[in-house]
Image: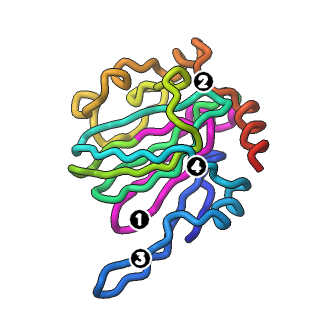
Amino acid sequence: MQIEPLPIEGAFLITPQQHGDDRGLFFEWFKAPVFAEAVGHPLSLAQANCSVSARGTLRGIHFADVPPGQAKYVTCLSGRILDVIVDIRVGSPTFGHWQAVELNTQSRRLVYLSEGLGHGFVALADSSTVVYLCSTTYNPSGEHEVDPFDPDLAIDWGLSREQASLSGKDAAAPGLQEAKAAGLLPDYAVCRDYVASLA
């Protein structure tokens, strides 16, 4: 597999090598030594999640308090999604920037996002099935959302707020600047120090 950094620090694109014949195909979608060498530390697996979404379902933008935060290793097992990573770390040189990657069953690509980054995705096909490995377990008191349609972020989801199917929490989420003013967003220096401690 090939692991390469994305323009947002702490975000990586993983491209597996697929081996196929008339029986089907095989590929490695996670390999601990390769991951640790590319990212700089091992992935501590605490929880594995699976979501199945109808076309137009948008989940995010979600993030967790740091420390400990929640790193995610994400892939799409069926269907197609547009996966979006957002830099919400106050003080980061790419604060407010986002990176979109299509995850599907052709390329079988994956993304990894470190602690402190925001994450969301929109299903581009019915029954899109997403699996993600998480570095920490779900902690409701430390989980937050940012409005996925915040004009300050201007994420191109390929659909409007009216067309998207959102949860009540995501629909009511504050914008980036509102979340910053409320002290909800992670601090860039704190995130860097925490990630460095994992090495």
Where residue 24 appears, as percent x and y from the top left, is 31, 80
Q: Earlier in the sequence, mark 1 or mark 2?
A: 1
Circle 3 packing at 10 Å, graded few (<14), some (14-19), many (20+), is few
Residue stretch in magenta: 92-120
Position of 161 relative to 30 (above/below): above
Q: Position of residue 181 (x, y in %)?
A: 59, 13
Which secondary structure lies at badge 3?
Answer: strand
**Quadrant of res 4:** bottom right
Distance from the alpha carbon under mark 4 to that under mark 3:
23 Å
- Amino acid bearing label 4: Leu
Marker disc for residue 26: 3
| Residue 102 lies within the magenta run | yes
Residue at 33% x, 43% y is 122
- Return the mark for residue 45: 4
Q: Amino acid at mark 2?
A: Leu
Which residue lies at the image location 34% right of the left edge and 44% below the top edge? 51
* Horizontal side of residue 191 vs 107, given as left or right: right
| Residue 188 in picture, x, y percent from top left | 70, 32
The residue where tag 2 is placed is: 185
Of the image marks 4 and 1, the number of the one nearer the N terminus: 4
Q: CA distance from mark 1 to mark 3?
A: 11 Å
Which of marks 2 and 4 precedes in the sequence? 4
In the depicted structure, whether residue 115 falls above or below residue 36: above
Q: Nearer the viewer, mark 4 or mark 2?
A: 4
Position of 136 relative to 152 (above/below): below
- Category of crowding for the residue at label 4, using alpha-carbon neighbours closer than 10 angstroms: few (below 14), some (14–19), many (at least 20): some
Mark 1 touches mark 2? (CB < 8 Å): no
Question: What residue is at 64 percent from the left and 47 percent from the top?
Answer: 10
Quadrant location, the N terminus? bottom right
Say which label, 4 or 3, has the lower sequence index.
Answer: 3
